């Protein structure tokens, strides 16, 4: 039951599931040999049934009949992703094609895979696919039609195809008549990679071929790899069209004033951008062209750990039939979700179409932003909850991309760690960080944008001693930044981080604005703050030929 309405099981065709398990051929648009859907052009031969662009109910039915998921009391589909409950960055590779070799920023996250190894892995995947049923989604990435690209996702699991259906832009029947894919993702979690043969690191692999515009995913059931691989493609392709690709959320007020929320997973992009007083454009990935902001996606992928109806009402209400939840624990008897249960992972997730958020912006296009917020979850409790940045400081913090990596977002992370992710999205940036930073700087100047650093992390001490800032306080500070109230208050320079800290914020206790005042031991605060400052300075040494005025924005660490 949801909002006083009972879900009718007949409407979901649940009575026919036993028959459905043996008679999939009666449901949906399928093709035995794959020719009709262009799969032979990819080398895919002799697959089982190919289900093309199934509806949400059909994909749910297939998942239930195959016993790969269950329905919760709220009508949403719940699945488990097994060993991989988050992204696996050490298993991501870019094919080292000669034509892109000099463009790619080869580093710890952009790891080369030879053309020969890619070809071998691709052949193994084609062999694996033979005789297996496939689910194909055809849609778009990029809400602005001037920059829109076709994305085709081929899955062996119907629930992963549901994920693609809900996360990307869904075409109309008329658009499908003229559809052409620009990017193809083939995700077959059942295929295990072999490090000795394939030149990879484990059984999991995410391989991007920027030239052939193909992504191969195997060994991992975590659906987030699908969306992030397409985002990586956009981070490469959009710069060639003078569009800044961004790892950020976006919303707008009733007057059309747009705001951007940059931040890594767990910093609050989705929660803070889903504001009942503003209209959501998108929660994670956007482009900034000379026409304004546009959403890359057609859906949201929100963390659900400790989700509450009080603090995240829009996300809470979005979880109903059509939503897909990963690794959320259900009560066995009443099928109620327990969002506080992290027994499988801290990185519990829900995917749903952006339309599930009330009064969202469709299509996901907005004007040039008036305000940009850099979100960080500082687990050391030393950054102020909000601070204003000059344009040079904005560049420094954008290139730094600091947060505390939270448990569960990536495989192997069990405690918060200091991390710096250039442009708040280093794992997804094929090009050098300076390319994206320079594009952002030009836009900040041209459109006279206010930039704020917002700490959604800890206060009163580090993780384990202090407490996390209350969401209502963070919302009040963000609202003050967005509605211009912070332009009317006094600021002082932070002695270590040099950023501008407001003396007052409407509706917020002034005692929390200065982090040093929230610590019992001020000397301990200064030691911790300088330790973080040294981490900033050490991290920034990776960037060469950076203008002096940006280097001067570095914090004081002595």
Image (tube, rainbow, N blue to C red):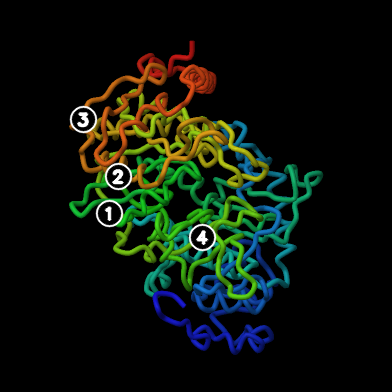
Q: Is residue 434 visible?
A: no
**Dot 2 corresponds to which residue?**
259
Residue 454, label in figure: none
Compute the Cα span from label 4 to label 1: 21 Å
Residue at mark 3 to residue at mark 1: CA–CA distance: 23 Å
Q: Earlier in the sequence, mark 1 or mark 2?
A: 2
Tell me which label, 2 or 4, sits earlier in the chain: 2
The residue mark sitting in front, 3 or 1, is 3
Q: What's the CA distance linking mark 1 and mark 2?
A: 10 Å
Of callouts 4 and 1, the N-terminal one: 1
Q: Which residue is mark 4?
A: 350
* Depth order, front residue of 519/315: 519
The tag on residue 489 is 3
Q: Earlier in the sequence, mark 3 or mark 2?
A: 2
Distance Cα–Cα, label 2 vs label 4: 24 Å
Question: Which secondary structure lies at badge 4?
Answer: strand
Crowd class of label 4 (few under 14; some 14 to 19; many from 20; radius 10 Å): many
Give how far apart the Cα atoms at labels 3 and 2 are: 20 Å
Residue 32 screen position, x and y as percent: 64, 79
- Whether residue 345 is situated above or below residue 179 in the rendered picture: above
Residue drawn where x is 41% and y is 17% of the image = 496
Question: 135 or 13, which is in the foreground?
Answer: 13
**Farthest right residue?**
196
Determine whether 65 is above or below 485 in the image: below
Circles 4 and 3 in contact, beta carbons < 8 Å: no
Taking the spot 60% from the left edge, 70% from the top edge, the residue there is 158
Near-viewer residue (332 or 452): 332
Residue position for label 1: 278
Q: Is residue 2 visible?
A: yes
């Amino acid at each position: 039951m949801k909002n006083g309405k009972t879900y009718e099981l007949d409407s979901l065709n649940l009575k026919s599931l036993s028959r459905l398990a043996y008679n999939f051929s009666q449901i949906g648009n399928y093709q035995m040999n794959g020719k009709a859907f262009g799969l032979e052009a990819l080398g895919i031969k002799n697959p089982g049934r190919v289900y093309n662009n199934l509806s949400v109910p059909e994909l749910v039915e297939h998942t239930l009949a195959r016993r790969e998921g269950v329905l919760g009391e709220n009508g949403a589909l719940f699945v488990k992703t097994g060993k991989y409950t988050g992204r696996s960055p050490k298993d991501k590779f870019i094919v080292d094609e000669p034509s892109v070799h000099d463009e790619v920023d080869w580093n710890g996250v952009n790891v080369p895979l030879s053309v020969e190894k890619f070809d071998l892995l691709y052949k193994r995947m084609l062999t694996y696919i033979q005789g297996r049923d496939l689910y194909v989604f055809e849609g778009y990435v990029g809400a602005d039609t001037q920059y829109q690209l076709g994305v085709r996702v081929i899955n062996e699991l119907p629930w992963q195809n549901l994920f693609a259906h809900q996360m990307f832009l869904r075409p109309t029947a008329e658009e499908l008549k003229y559809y052409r894919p620009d990017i193809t993702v083939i995700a077959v979690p059942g295929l295990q990679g072999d490090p000795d043969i394939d030149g990879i690191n484990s059984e999991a692999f995410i391989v991007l071929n920027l030239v052939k515009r193909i992504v191969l995913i195997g060994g991992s059931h975590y659906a987030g790899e699908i969306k992030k691989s397409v985002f990586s493609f956009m981070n490469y392709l959009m710069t060639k069209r003078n569009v800044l690709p961004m790892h950020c959320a976006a919303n707008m007020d009733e007057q059309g004033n747009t705001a951007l929320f940059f931040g890594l997973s767990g910093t609050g992009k989705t929660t803070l951008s889903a504001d009942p007083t503003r209209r959501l454009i998108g929660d994670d990935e956007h482009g900034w062209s000379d026409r304004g902001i546009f959403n890359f996606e057609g859906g949201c992928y929100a963390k659900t750990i400790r989700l509450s109806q009080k603090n995240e009402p829009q996300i809470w209400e979005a979880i109903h039939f059509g939503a897909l939840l990963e690794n959320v624990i259900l009560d066995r008897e009443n099928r109620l979700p327990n969002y506080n249960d992290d027994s499988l992972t801290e990185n519990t997730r829900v995917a749903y179409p952006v339309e599930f958020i009330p009064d969202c912006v469709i299509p996901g296009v907005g004007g040039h932003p008036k305000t940009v917020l850099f979100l960080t979850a500082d687990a050391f409790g030393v950054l102020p909850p909000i601070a204003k940045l000059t344009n040079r400081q904005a560049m420094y913090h954008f290139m730094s991309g600091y947060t505390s990596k939270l448990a569960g977002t990536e495989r192997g992370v069990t405690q918060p760690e200091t991390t710096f992710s250039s442009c708040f999205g280093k794992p997804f940036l094929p090009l050098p960080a300076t390319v994206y930073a320079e594009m952002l700087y030009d836009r900040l100047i041209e459109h006279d944008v206010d930039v704020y650093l917002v700490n959604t992390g800890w206060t009163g001490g580090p993780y384990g001693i202090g407490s996390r800032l209350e969401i209502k306080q963070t919302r009040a500070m963000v609202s003050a930044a967005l509605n211009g109230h912070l332009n009317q208050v006094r600021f002082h320079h932070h002695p270590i981080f040099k950023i501008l800290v407001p003396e007052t914020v409407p509706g917020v206790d002034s005692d929390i604005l200065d982090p040093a005042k929230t610590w019992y031991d001020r000397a301990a605060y200064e030691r911790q703050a300088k330790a973080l400052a040294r981490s900033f300075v050490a991290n920034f040494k990776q960037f060469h030929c950076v203008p002096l005025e940006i280097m001067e924005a570095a914090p004081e660490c002595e």
